[in-house]
Image: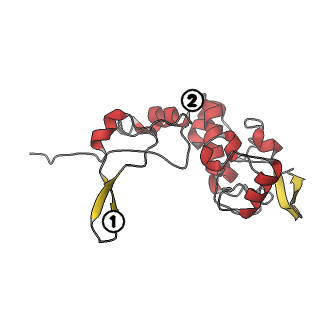
Amino acid sequence: MYHAARRARDPPLDDDVRTTIPELGTMQILRGFDGDKPILEDNTKPITLRMLLTHVVGLGYDIPNPDLIKWSNYVGRTARNLDWSKEGFTVPFKFTPGEGWWYGTAIDWAALLLEAATGQTLGQYMKANILLPLGMEDTTFWPGSDFDARFVAYTSRRGDGSLEAVAPPVDKDSDHPSRAAARDYSPPRVTTAPS
């Protein structure tokens, strides 16, 4: 992602990316609560690509975090991180950017930065610049029906120890864009020994 952003606009790792992704400039820092009311503070620190790639920006996942759930309920937010949308990724910072570490949606914001810098989706960029040059023609974020016959059967163990087939967890009908943290599919490479 860094190379795509660099080729498109030549931003070093430590340039402030809030001009490219304005939503990052409006996010506040959640300092706690006064009863149910969130205590928010404006962020005056820059947000850099380095911070996004190393998870030191202060953006985490909302579902396992009681503070982000409480904030979401207070402001009436219905979008969640797993909606895979800007709205779903837009939450307050847990700390001042650069002053802590928290695994979460920072990598998704880096993907949005790449998309803004290149004019391509993450999937389009990866296919053209990474996957196809590596000969990975069948790797995709969204497998089509041509993948059905090639999926390895998913199984679940029954109480008696036997296995039963279950449907694969593939969301083929999703219309959300590809994101950085999940959902890539690739068949194993089949090779033959030289004769």
Residue at image point 71% right, 46% down: 78
Quarter of the image with the N terminus is top right
Q: Is residue 35 above or below residue 168?
A: below
Instruction: Identify the mark at residue 157; answer none if there is no mark.
Output: 1
Residue 194 x/y as whole percent: 13, 46
82 sits left or right of 171 in the view: right
**Residue closest to the eye, 142 or 137:** 142
Q: Amino acid at mark 2?
A: Gln
Q: Of the numbered discs in the image, which one, if any, rests on residue 79?
A: none
How is this picture coloured?
secondary structure
Q: Residue at x 68, y 45 (%)?
A: 88
Q: Quadrant of residue 38?
A: bottom right
The nearer-to-camera label among 2 and 1 is: 1
Q: Determine whether the residue tagged by mark 2 lies in a helix, strand or loop.
A: loop
Residue 103 at x, y = what percent? 64, 59
Q: Residue 149 location in percent, x, y?
A: 27, 40
**Is 41 left or right of 194, judged from the image as shown?**
right
Residue at x-position 30% and y-position 48%:
188
For marks 2 and 1, give the CA distance: 41 Å
Amino acid type for the residue under numbered disc 1: Arg
| Residue placed most toward the observer, 12 or 163 | 163
Front-most of residues 32 and 22: 32
- Can you give x and y, in whole percent of width and height, for residue 183 in the image? 48, 46
Does the rendering let one see residue 30?
yes
Within-10-Å neighbours for mark 1: few <14, some 14–19, many 20+ = few
Is the Cβ of the residue at disc 2 closer than 8 Å to that at disc 1? no
At horizontal 87% and vertical 63% (from top left) the residue drawn is 33
- Whether residue 69 sits left or right of residue 177 in the image: it is right
Q: Label 2 belongs to which residue?
A: 120
